Amino acid sequence: MWNMEECEFDAGNLTLKFREVVPSRLEFVDEAIEHIMETVRSMPCAQENLEEVNLALTEAMSNAVIHGNRSNPEKKVVICGACEGHDKLLLVVTDEGEGFDPAKIPDPTVADNIFAAHGRGIFLINQLMDQAEFRKGGRQVVLRKKVARG
């Protein structure tokens, strides 16, 4: 049921784990995001900035389906989530594609790329989350968002 290989969580520090498997078809992304965000909203580590989390997760899943798995319905996207401590949401999105080198993605804020029709997903993810780490040759993105405690 819980495949640590897909999620690579440090199980000792995590609570409220969940795992969702989604076929690589864009028409399933919105419904999966809605279901995942319903779970996330119930987690004590994710009570703020949920719009940012929603958008970053949507971008990560869309990238996994379109670019990672090439919309191949035989392939899956696995999304895992947990609370790290009491104040940090952890989301892991893994695809079955060939991966990519995030350093080779053009900066969408550079003049030559401003009007490009694509290439903003990773930029948005990095802006919206506190941390975005690419693993497994670009087949997995680990997203972290900390709850601001006043």
Image (cartoon, rainbow, N blue to C red):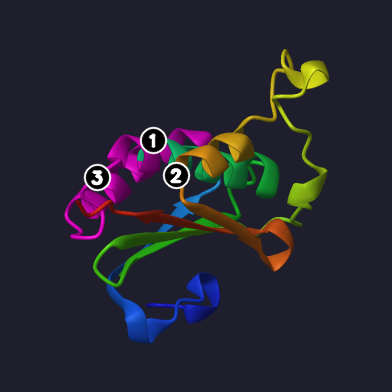
> What is the x, y in percent for residue 63?
60, 41
Q: Is residue 128 above or below residue 94?
A: above
Q: Residue furthest top?
A: 115
Q: Which segment is the magenta one?
A: 26-53
> Answer yes or no: do the residues labelled 3 and 2 have beta carbons within 8 Å?
no
Question: Circles 3 and 1: CB distance less than 8 Å?
Answer: no
User: Which residue is identified by label 3?
Assistant: 48
User: In this orientation, does residue 71 appear?
Assistant: yes
The secondary structure type at the circle numbered 2 is: helix
Label 3 element class: loop
Q: Amino acid at mark 1?
A: Asp
The residue located at (39%, 77%) in the rendering is: 2
Q: Main secondary structure of the magenta part?
A: helix
Label located before the other in sequence (3 or 1): 1
Residue 129 coordinates in the image, percent (x, y) = 46, 46
| Magenta stretch encompasses residue 52 | yes
Q: Is residue 60 above or below residue 144?
A: above
Q: Quick one: which residue is furthest to the front in this view? A: 150
Front-lying residue, 147 or 20: 147
| Res. 57 mark | 2
State yes or no: residue 99 in magenta: no
User: Considering the image in quadrants, where does the N terminus appear?
Assistant: bottom left
x and y percentages locating residue 17 in the rendered image: 30, 70
Q: Which residue is depicted at the point 72% across and 13% down?
A: 115
